[in-house]
Image (cartoon, grey):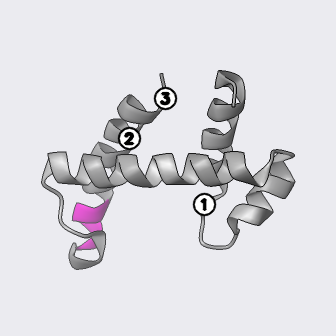
Amino acid sequence: MDEQTRQMALLWVLNMSDGQHSLIDIAERAGLAFIHIESAAAALWLSVCCACSRAGLTPAASLDPHTQAKAATRLSAAVFQNVLP
């Protein structure tokens, strides 16, 4: 997969990962091959896991809403630093 396709797949997954859309839905809407969307989702998941570990974050379900919001902000920055060039 070329770099532009990889970046577009990452952005589509980030944009549509709302619990309402499957990876197939995202691939169809984006007009990209499922394998590209699946690869982007896997890369994002790995980045989230690594970022959580480095940041010392606990699972979001155990945090109060205010702490979840702060953790999400920190996590978003860490994910973008590791996934996007």
Q: Main secondary structure of the magenta part?
A: helix
Q: Position of residue 61 (x, y in %)?
A: 29, 77
**Residue at the farthest left position:** 56
Measured as percent of width and height from the top left, residue 68 is found at 29, 63
Residue, disc 2: 79
Q: Residues within 10 Å of mark 1 (few under 14, many from 20)?
A: some
Q: Is residue 76 left or right of residue 35?
A: left
Tell me whether the residue at label 2 lies in contact with that at label 3, contact meaning CB atoms closer than 8 angstroms.
Answer: no
Q: Which residues fall within the magenta stretch? A: 64-68
Q: Separation of disc 2 and disc 3 at Cα?
A: 8 Å
Query: What residue is at 64 percent from the left and 23 percent from the top?
Result: 3
Q: Is residue 73 left or right of residue 6?
A: left
Please, is residue 80 above or below residue 26 in the view? above
- Using the image, tell me which numbered label, if any, was put on residue 17: 1
* Label 2, residues with CA under 10 Å away: few <14, some 14-19, many ≥20: many
CA gap, disc 2 and disc 1: 15 Å
- Label 2 vs 1, first from the N-terminus: 1
3 and 1 marks in contact (CB < 8 Å): no
Q: Which image quadrant for residue 9?
A: top right
Q: Which residue is mark 3?
A: 84
